[in-house]
Image: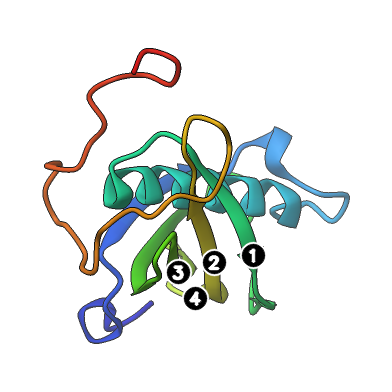
Amino acid sequence: MDGNAAQGINFYTRKWVRPEDLNANGTLFGGSLLRWIDEEAAIYAIIQLGNHRVVTKFISEINFESSARQGDLIEMGLVATDFGRTSLTMRAQVRNMITRKTILSIERIVFVNLDEYGQASPHGYTSITYDRDRMPTSRPGED
């Protein structure tokens, strides 16, 4: 993720690699990393679409380029790349803050906006927000 501004990545979360995140080789378990990315992407989608009811629809090919070890700090970045009628597509990158190497990149993660019945629902947005103006003000089931 060197040159983040040029790549448009605009949402950062950092994680500390702990013993429970390791695989048998003593490096970061890919499943842990994918869980973190999916959770951060869901939070990003909630903020961008203004709705707690979003679900992961699609994750494209995942390209693991390097890894991390216990004690390393990693940084995850997301950027919205397309707003569909009911969906949001984003790109993700993760890098090791210690080694400065890219750990993985995912070109497309698609989330779908749902209504209270679990059906795809138009969200009405066409651009990224950098504020919290779309942040939902109620919890699911309280609307």
Q: Residue at x 35, y 38 (%)?
A: 51
Mark 3 / mark 2, whichever is N-terminal: 3
The dot on residue 89 is: 3
Q: Residue 109 got which mark?
A: 2
The amino acid type of the residue labelled 3 equals Thr
Sooner in the amino-acid sequence: mark 2 or mark 1: 1
Q: Nearer the viewer, mark 2 or mark 4?
A: 2
Residue at 64% over, 74% down: 66
Whether tag 2 and tag 4 are in contact, CB under 8 A, the answer is no
Residue appearing at x 54%, y 75% in the figure: 108
Q: Residues within 10 Å of mark 3 (few under 14, many from 20)?
A: many
Q: Earlier in the sequence, mark 4 or mark 1?
A: 1
Give the residue type at disc 2. Ile
The C terminus sits in image quarter: top left
- Cα separation, mark 2 vs mark 1, equals 6 Å
The secondary structure type at the circle numbered 4 is loop
Query: Mark 3 or mark 4: which is in front?
Result: 3
Q: Whole-Å distance between the Cαs marked 3 and 4?
A: 25 Å
The span from disc 4 to disc 1 (Cα, nearest Å) is 26 Å
Residue where numbered disc 1 is placed: 58
Along the viewing direction, whichever of 44 and 76 lies nearer the viewer: 44
Local secondary structure at mark 3: strand
Give the SS element for disc 1. strand
The answer to the question of whether label 4 and label 1 lie on touching residues, with beta carbons closer than 8 A, is no
Percent x, y of residue 33:
63, 52
Relative to 58, 142 lies left or right: left
